[in-house]
Amino acid sequence: MPPQEPPARPELTIVTGTSDTVTELTGRRQEEIPERLPDAIVLLLSGPNLNLLGQRQPEIYGRDTLADHVAKATMAAAEHGLALEHVQSDYEGALIEAVHEARGRAAAIVVNPGALTHYSWSLHDALAAFDGVVVELHLSNPAAREPWRHTSVVAGVADGTIAGFGGLGYRLAVRAVAALLATRRAGPA
Ligand code: CA2
């Protein structure tokens, strides 16, 4: 038998989520979703302890794991022609390096800094040096919780904040990124 050609490389690979998840989220089978080259990269950054989602405090953060949220965000990004990369770290420096590496490469950052939200001026400075869109994201609504959570040192360098909508926030954040990128591409009215 002659050697077989390798299958054509898909132009957009959905890295997380199963085809069942695709169907659940889009109502279409994965094969039915048109593939196209992503227009831009969105970096999703998750701060300390977010890898524990789904294991504790479901009454505040829900039952979904971080992998579930990343799968939904990846799917939402693909629907908007965006490629999503995800970095989670418990280390402030690693998150800051991820922001530096996104400069000139990613069009947007969606960041849930975890508790770093409330005190990391280093993360603030790194995000301030990023040229693209920045969306701050929280599962809970920190403004409705303990007073020390009411301050975000990141909010001032974000284009906007989405908080209090649980897992839905991930899709809303990607939608906000897509809308802001489209506005920026269109230029001033
Ligand atoms: O609501 C959010 O998304 C937060 O960013 C979550 C942070 C919290 O410090 C912020 O004030 C608001 C906490 C992330 C850690 O989540 C855990 C989840 C399960 C078990 C332990 C921690």
Image (cartoon, grey):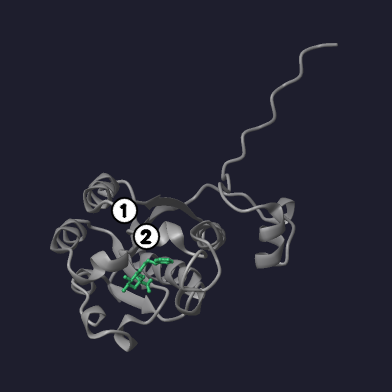
Q: Earlier in the sequence, mark 2 or mark 1?
A: 2
Give x and y (percent) for residue 150. Answer: 24, 82
Q: Callout 1, which amino acid?
A: Asp
* Neighbours of disc 1 within 10 Å: few (<14), some (14-19), many (20+): some
Marks 2 & 1, CB-CB < 8 Å contact: yes
Q: As displayed, is residue 88 above or below residue 154?
A: above
Residue drawn at the location 22% of the way across and 51% of the way down: 96
Q: As displayed, is residue 41 above or below residue 57?
A: above
Number of numbered tags placed on the structure image:
2
Is label 1's Cβ within 8 Å of ligand 1?
Answer: no
Q: Within the image, what quadrant is residue 149 found in? A: bottom left
Is label 2's Cβ within 8 Å of ligand 1?
Answer: yes
Residue drawn at the location 23% of the way across and 85% of the way down: 147
Residue most extreme to the right: 1
Residue drawn at the location 22% of the way across and 75% of the way down: 152
Q: Quadrant of the C terminus?
A: bottom left
Q: Callout 2, which amino acid?
A: Asn
Q: Which residue is mark 1?
A: 90
Q: Within the image, what quadrant is residue 123 found in? A: bottom left
Q: As displayed, is residue 129 above or below residue 188?
A: above
In the foreground, 188 or 48: 48
Q: Specify the label residue 25 is tagged with.
A: none
How far, Cα to Cα, is label 2 from label 1?
Answer: 6 Å
Q: Which residue is mark 2?
A: 49
Q: Is residue 95 left or right of residue 84?
A: left
* Neighbours of disc 2 within 10 Å: few (<14), some (14-19), many (20+): some
Q: Quadrant of the N terminus?
A: top right
Residue drawn at the location 32% of the way across and 85% of the way down: 145
Q: Is residue 169 left or right of residue 136?
A: right
In the foreground, 176 or 96: 96
